[in-house]
Each structure stands twice: as structure tokens, then as C-alpha cells.
Image (cartoon, rainbow, N blue to C red):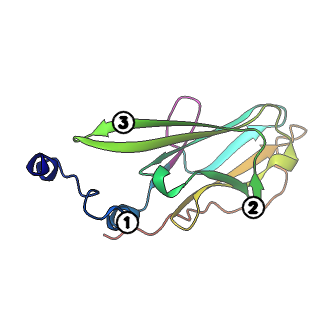
Amino acid sequence: MDRQARENGDRGTQNPERAEEADATEAPVLNITDDAGRVISGERHLKAGSALRLKCEGRDVLEKLNESLIWTRGDEILSSHVSENRTTEIVDDKEVSVIVSALTIEKASPRHAGNYSCIVPDRAKTTIAVHVLNGKQGTSNQLNYQSTSDQQPSEG
């Protein structure tokens, strides 16, 4: 049975803490998506009174280390209007933890504009700038948010 465990890549039987350290070195993959599941980045514009719906899909988030997805707007941690679903997928014969966190504001107003980030603390972050149009003259609410991507830089 030990041979079978080794063939299946069971590295947690000898030293489970060491296996967790190895898993923790890879940053989770985060994507912000729209209602249709399309990845969005940069900026999102919407009219005042319409719904703001953002979903963040996190892959390789380590449940065993109690990691979770957190939404922020600027420096404010958002806890209301947030729901979360955890699943596991099999990719290339490997179990991958997937967390989908949804942020929903049914009637957005200019006060809901800002830089929204989906974060796995100390490991990964992705940001989208949300602009809410005031509807009077078709202009935005005059915020000077820049589109930023705070994900860790990729090498290439």
C-alpha cells in the first residue's frame, strides 16, 4: 500500500506540514467575471440604478490553510452583499480547490464607484475600477480611478 501511495503522489503521509508548504508556494489564480462568466479586467461602467454584479473565481486557494476570498473597495473590506461557493474540480488527475465569491449590489449609485479587489490575503489580488454613471448628462461621477492590476507580475 505504501508503494501505491507513492505512485499516486501521496506526499502528505510522511510530513503533512512540508506538503502544505509546497502547495502554498504557488499563488492562487484569481479572475473577476461578469454575469455571463466572461473574464473582465480594467474598468466596468454602469448606469446609476442598475445592478453591479462581480464574481471572483479563485483556483488553488488552500482550504487546509483556512484561505478565503475577500472583496474590498479601496481599503474597506466588504462583507455584506457577498456570497461564496466552494467546490473541487479534477484537472489533469489533480484535485483543484475552486472558490467562487459573488458581490452583488442591486441598485448601484455613484457612492458604489471605486476600485474593487478580490484578494487572497498575502498571496494574490486582482482589481477592477467600477464607474457609476449619474445618468443626468451621461458623464461619470468624476472619480479619477485608474485601471490597475495588482496581481503579482508574471515572468516572461
Q: Is residue 68 found inside the magenta-colored segment of the image?
A: no
Up-down: is 10 above or below 46?
A: below
* Residue type marked 1: Glu
Position of 12 relative to 49 (above/below): below
Q: Pointer 3: residues within 10 angstroms few (<14), some, or many (20+)?
A: few
Mark 2, other Cα within 10 Å: few <14 / some 14–19 / many ≥20: some
Q: Given this view, does label 2 or label 1 mark the residue nearer the observer?
A: 1
Mark 3 = which residue? 89
Element type where label 1 sits in the image: helix
Q: Residue furthest left?
A: 3
Q: Main secondary structure of the magenta part?
A: loop
Q: Nearer the viewer, residue 3 or 128?
A: 3
Q: Which mark is residue 74?
A: 2
The tag earlier along the polypeptide, 2 or 3, is 2
Dot placed on the residue nearer the N-terminal end, 2 or 1: 1
Dot 3 amino acid type: Glu
Task: Magenta stretch: give its range.
Answer: 31-39
> Which residue is tagged 1?
17
**Numbered circle sitting on residue 143:** none
Specify the quadrant that holds the C terminus.
bottom left
Q: Is residue 133 above or below residue 145?
A: above
First along the sequence among labels 3 and 1: 1
User: Is 35 included in the stretch rendered in magenta?
Assistant: yes
Q: Which callout, 3 or 1, points to the residue nearer the camera?
A: 1
Residue in the image at 67% along x and 63% along y: 146
Residue at point 58% right, 63% down?
A: 121
In the picture shown, does residue 144 fall above or below 95?
A: below
Q: Quadrant of the N terminus?
A: top left
Q: Secondary structure at mark 2?
A: loop
Residue 141, percent from left and from top? 85, 51
